[in-house]
Image: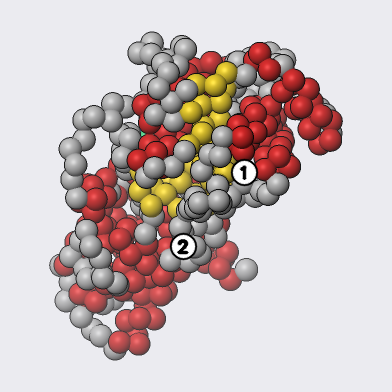
């Protein structure tokens, strides 16, 4: 209760500051999801097609098997085949991966985080730079920078209180201690929970299910992951579980083709749980090392989407004999604090094992990564820092904080 009251006070304080300054670039993040929902409502087609949303769970599963009986609907893309319908005409085609030069991995991360560095960490360094003492105003300005970077009120308070305690414990009067203390607080928050992705191993194949709102970057992330595993010598199968739009199937086909991996797909409008069923059977029959299932980010409404995801999850669990090894929620970092409510909603539909935070390269509000770790308690496992095939990185808390504060020492030894 105390925390909530303090949250409210802090929010009221910042809103009044923002109002005084006028709505400019300092305004809080816009609610992209609300816009998306409004757009969804406008664009929503009529009655449902292809989604058996009214059936009970057992009926769902039987219906899946019935759908799978229609073997003619299943198409398998061989690794080297040119997928039907894929091509330049697809508006959702992935970025050309040939453009980026090979650069140091850490340099790539640092470059990808340049906007967040400018919007958050460099501002912290600057606010400390011009001071000779640590006063209340310094803590208040630190709060302001963090809130504007979408760290969120509870996590901002946690960081600022943590810094205050560290300053008191160190008995330091020198403001230069603030930046390293902020970095340490951030590292502590981001280190919570396991952040490593389940690894395919000989005799222990893995199944990943990828969920998230439309446009978050699910299909792109799957394409990048497929390329990574393929390069590591694994046999990869992708399942085109977003049957809501033909373009979604085509988009995944382009990625599968580019990565040189197999794709299981049905027609547009077919039951995604049937795709999941077929994909699992194919993965078992062909001894795949990794199966990655794409899912829809948008259906006629949110209830249908969540019901569909639960059904796909149950089919995988039943056919694979275990839950998916990873159920990854993909969140667009630009959606800011709204990413938290997305996480809460998806968690109600399917158990989640981690978050993929995409488009960190195109936002100054990468502070959302801290809010997700601190408030949702889900590990951030992967981050997207660009559209190219190798712009997906395993998340490493220490490396991330070093990329935000390049001048500070590492908490552990690294080879860049
Ligand atoms: N800059 C940048 N763009 C990205 C990143 N990840 C994805 N994108 C872009 O985001 C857009 C949407 O990505 P998709 O992979 O189609 O998103 P989705 O979640 O599959 O969307 P739906 O299929 O509509 O549910 C595409 O233009 C991607 O190229 C990233 O890390 N950085
Ligand atoms: Mg997609």
Q: Which residue is mark 2?
A: 155
Image coordinates for residue 2, horizontal then vertical, percent: 58, 71
Q: Is residue 85 left or right of residue 27?
A: right
**Viewer-side label of 2, 1:** 1
Is any atom of residue 36 visible in this view?
Answer: no
Q: Is residue 282 left or right of residue 80?
A: right
Establish whether ligand 1 lies closer than 8 Å to the Cβ of label 2. no
Question: Looking at the rendered structure, which numbered label has been put on residue 55?
Answer: none
Residue positioned 51% across, 33% down in the render: 237
Residue positioned 45% across, 16% down in the render: 83
Near mark 1 (Cα within 10 A), the count class, few <14, some 14-19 or many ≥20, is some
**Count of numbered badges drawn on the protein:** 2
**Marks 2 and 1, how far apart at CA:** 21 Å
Quarter that holds the C terminus: bottom left
Which quadrant does ligand 1 occupy? top left
Quarter that holds the N terminus: bottom right
Q: Is residue 363 above or below residue 134?
A: above
Q: Is residue 188 left or right of residue 283?
A: left
Image coordinates for residue 290, horizontal then vertical, percent: 51, 42
Q: Earlier in the sequence, mark 2 or mark 1?
A: 2
Establish whether ligand 1 lies closer than 8 Å to the Cβ of label 1. no
Image coordinates for residue 266, horizontal then vertical, percent: 60, 19
Near mark 2 (Cα within 10 A), the count class, few <14, some 14-19 or many ≥20, is many
Q: Nearer the viewer, residue 10 or 244?
A: 244
Q: Nearer the viewer, residue 370 or 255?
A: 255
Q: Which residue is mark 1?
A: 346
Label 2 SS:
helix
Is any atom of residue 57 visible in this view?
Answer: yes
Label 1 SS:
helix
Residue positioned 31% across, 46% down in the render: 364
Residue 396 placement: quadrant: bottom left
């Amino acid at each position: 209760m105390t925390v909530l009251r303090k949250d409210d006070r802090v929010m009221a304080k910042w809103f009044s500051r923002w109002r005084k300054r006028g709505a400019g670039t300092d305004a809080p993040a816009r609610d992209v999801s609300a816009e998306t929902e409004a757009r969804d409502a406008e664009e929503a087609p009529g009655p449902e097609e292809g989604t058996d949303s009214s059936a009970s769970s057992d009926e769902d599963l039987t219906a899946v098997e019935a759908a799978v009986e229609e073997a003619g609907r299943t198409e398998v893309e061989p690794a080297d085949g040119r997928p039907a319908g894929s091509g330049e005409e697809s508006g959702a085609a992935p970025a050309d991966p040939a453009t980026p030069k090979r650069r140091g991995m850490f340099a790539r991360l640092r470059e990808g985080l340049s906007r967040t560095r400018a919007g958050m960490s460099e501002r912290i360094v600057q606010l400390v730079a011009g001071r000779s003492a640590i006063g209340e105003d310094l803590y208040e300005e630190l709060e302001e920078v963090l809130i504007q970077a979408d760290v969120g009120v509870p996590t901002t308070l946690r960081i600022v209180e943590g810094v205050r305690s560290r300053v008191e414990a160190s008995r330091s009067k020198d403001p230069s201690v603030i930046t390293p203390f902020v970095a340490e607080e951030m590292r502590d928050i981001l280190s919570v929970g396991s952040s490593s992705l389940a690894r395919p191993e000989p005799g222990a194949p893995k199944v990943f299910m990828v969920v998230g709102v439309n446009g978050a970057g699910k299909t792109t992330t799957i394409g990048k992951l497929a390329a990574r595993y393929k390069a590591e010598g694994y046999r990869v199968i992708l399942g085109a579980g977003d049957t809501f739009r033909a373009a979604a199937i085509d988009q995944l086909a382009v990625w599968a083709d580019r990565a040189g991996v197999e794709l299981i797909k049905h027609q547009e409008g077919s039951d995604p749980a049937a795709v999941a069923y077929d994909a699992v059977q194919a993965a078992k029959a062909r001894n795949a090392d990794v199966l990655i299932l794409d899912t829809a980010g948008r259906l006629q409404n949110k209830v249908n989407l969540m019901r569909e995801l639960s059904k796909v999850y149950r089919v995988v669990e039943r056919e694979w004999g275990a839950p998916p090894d990873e159920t990854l929620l993909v969140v667009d970092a630009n959606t800011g604090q709204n990413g938290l409510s997305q996480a809460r909603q998806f968690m109600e539909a399917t158990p989640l094992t981690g978050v993929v935070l995409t488009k960190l390269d195109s936002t100054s509000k990468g502070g959302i990564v801290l809010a997700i770790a601190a408030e949702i308690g889900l590990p951030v496992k992967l981050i997207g820092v660009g559209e190219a095939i190798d712009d997906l990185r395993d998340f490493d808390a220490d490396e991330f904080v070093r990329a935000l504060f390049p001048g500070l020492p590492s908490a552990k030894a690294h080879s860049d």
